[in-house]
Structure formats: structure tokens, C-alpha cells
Image (cartoon, rainbow, N blue to C red):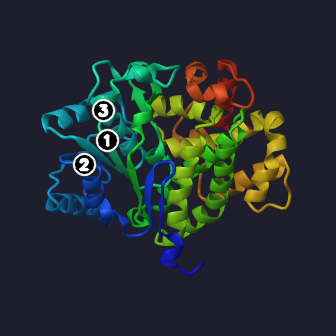
Amino acid sequence: MNTFEPAQVTANWGFPTDIKVGPGRLSELPEICRELGFQRPLLVTDPGVKDLPMIGEAMDALNNAGLPVALFADIRGNPNGANVDAGVEVFRSGHHDSVIAFGGGSALDAAKAIALMVGQERPIWDFEDVGDNWKRAHADGIAPCVAIPTTAGTGSEVGRASVITNDETHRKMIIFHPRMLPAAVILDPETTVGLPPQITAATGMDALSHCFEAWCAPGFHPMADGIALEGLRLIGTALPRAYDDGKDIEARTHMLAAASMGSTAFQKGLGAVHAISHPVGAIYHTHHGLTNAVMLPYVMRFNHAAIADRMGPVAQALGLVDTSFDAVFNWVLQFRERLGVPHTLADLGVDDNRADEIGRLGEIDPPAAKNPVPVKATDLESIFVQAVNGRL
């Protein structure tokens, strides 16, 4: 393992937003909030994080700095519209003026959606990331937000959207507005050292799927392509280290960076991995990152003809001598196994009884439009059934 030298993993980045990187940077939260003009922030987190010492310490620091803060943590693993509505009510009743998003991807998504909705009159579903729906929002009513991820997966801390489940339609919907991008981010690896290996693997594979699908998405976006490749390189080396030793600060830092990079890169697009994972998560309540990890090779096989010529740079980023599709495909299978990722959706408690519904919902999920091979509901249904039954 490399010797940890703080100078190597401490930095300030201005892209894609203001990002403070490095161990111990959480202590700067009150100063960051003051610089942004926060006066009464609402700290939004998830039930699994709210009782951890770092939350209490952050709230004490804010209160001691003259920034009275309240806590909202009524968020489920796949946040839904009711969670957002409840958070908006707490925000308004407490006369808050800002949001601190603190936790895993679910907390960050919910927090950003709350920040959006505190100044809106329309229902949240009117801001789905389709066309120019975002222009319907009262932009001046969106509360400013600071984001602090405690997992290295979704990269939601640098995203302009949130994934929120509509329980009535069983759809995970992407809610978008440019001003949902947090004004500042703290990537402090010390907030992630307590993650158990299985969550480290699942969230890390989420970041990998973002980078991989962004690289494979059609279209001209060389900035996203470059970020995606470097994200893959970082994940290929750092994720096994973080999985084996949760206190490896350098690996944890690299994974936080890679997660943010994956989210930045997928402005180019995603694909069928996410188009299937979203409805699977909405219906079966599976962990999003773990679902992506299971789905990835099945979608790779389906996309083979369209992505084979793009595997050379991926192989090089992963340190492979063989630059063929098969080499990258086999690396993905071995990497999943190394991290204890199940091979089938059945291992996650998913059956194929609702395969047609998964196909229909997947077809209208926005990532489907950027899959390298055009997909219809029947294609997504077929891939899903293969993933349930482990047929590669």
C-alpha cells in the first residue's frame, strides 16, 4: 500500500463546483456555510447516518458558529415523493434558508429535491428531466445547498438532478434543474471509513457503472470521455483497497473523487444498465449500486457490437494488456467476484414475474435513449430476464 501523504490527497477544485478534498475538511463546514450566506440550514441525512458522531459534531460546530441547524432524516433507501414533501414541510415550518445534504446517495438526492421544491408550487413530477421541463420551476425559490457524501458511489454531490421514486407509477424519476447543483462540496474520506465492505463495493460499482456507461454513450463529449476513463482507472485500483481496508485514506479519497467524476461524466449519457436498474429498484427496492453491478455484464453483452471498438482505452485505463472486448468483459466479471457482488438479480430477491413491466418502464426511463444500441421495451425485458436467471 502507498504511504499516505496528506499533500497528495488534499486539494481545492473549482470544477464542476467548489469542492474541498481531503481528510479533516469536514471541519470547514461552518466557514463554508457562512461564506455562502447561510443563516438557518436544514441538515438532511438518512436514518443510517443520523446517529453517527460526525453528524452530532457537525451540528454542534454549526450551532457554535451561530448557525442554528435542524435535522431531517425521514428518508428511505430509494427516496420517494412523500419523503421530499415531508422535508419541505420541515424546511418551511422551521424557517430555514438553506440545505446541507449529508450522507449517501439517497440523502443527497432527497436533500437536493427538498432544496428545489421549497420554492415551487407545481408537483415535483413536473420537473422530470424531459425536454425543458426545468424551466417551469421558480429558479429564485431554490434553496442553496452544500453536499457532503459519506459513500463513494452516486456522485450526486456534483449532480444537477435527483432520482426520486413515484410510488403511484412505480417509476424512479430523474428530477432536474441546473440550480440543483450544490454550491459547495466536501469530499472528506474520513466520513467514509466506517462503510462496511459490502456497501463500499456496491457504491463503488455504482461509480464504475457511471463511468463505463458514460464512456460508451453515443455522442461527442470528449471532456466527459476523459473524465470517465480516469474514473475507471481510479476505481480499478482504489476500490479493492477500500474494500479490503476501510481505513485506507488514500483509497477512500480516490473513490470519492471517482464517484464525483462518474456523475460529471454521465452528463454525456448513461444506458440500459440504469434504464433497467431504475424500475427494478422502484419495484423490488433493491440497492441501486448493487443492481447496477449485477446488470453491467448483461448489458455489455447486449451492446457488444456497438461498444467493442471503444474497449481499447478502457482496457488501457484498467491496466490490461489485452485490449479486446472479451478482456474488459472478463475483467468486469472477475472484479465483481473479487468484491463479493452477486451474479444474478435473483440473488437480490428479484424474480421475473414482472418482466414486461420492467421493460415498459425501462423504455421510458431517460438513460435508455443513450444506450449504444437502440433499445425497445422487449429488449430491456429480455436483458432483465437474463440477469434474473444468470444467462450470459
Q: Is residue 369 positioned above or below 25 on the image?
A: above
Q: Is residue 187 positioned above or below 80 on the image?
A: below
Q: Position of residue 53 (x, y in %)?
A: 26, 64
- Which quadrant, please, contains the N terminus? bottom right
Q: Which residue is mark 2?
A: 37
Q: CA distance from mark 2 to mark 1?
A: 9 Å
Q: Identity of the amino acid at label 3?
A: Val
**Residue 182 in the figure: left or right of residue 42:** right
What residue is rendered at 83% in x and 41% in y? 308
What residue is rendered at 60% in x and 59% in y? 339
**Residue 346 in the figure: left or right of residue 75:** right
Give the class, few, some or many, for how many residues have Cα within 10 Å of label 2's Cα (few <14, many ≥20): few
Q: Position of residue 166 (x, y in %)?
A: 40, 24
- Residue 50 in view in this figure: no
Is there a contact, CB below 8 Å, between mark 2 and mark 1?
Answer: yes
**Which picture quadrant has residue 385?**
top right
Q: Position of residue 196 (x, y in %)?
A: 45, 61
Residue 84: numbered disc:
3
Circle 1: element type: loop
- Which quadrant, please, contains the C terminus? top right
Circle 3: element type: helix
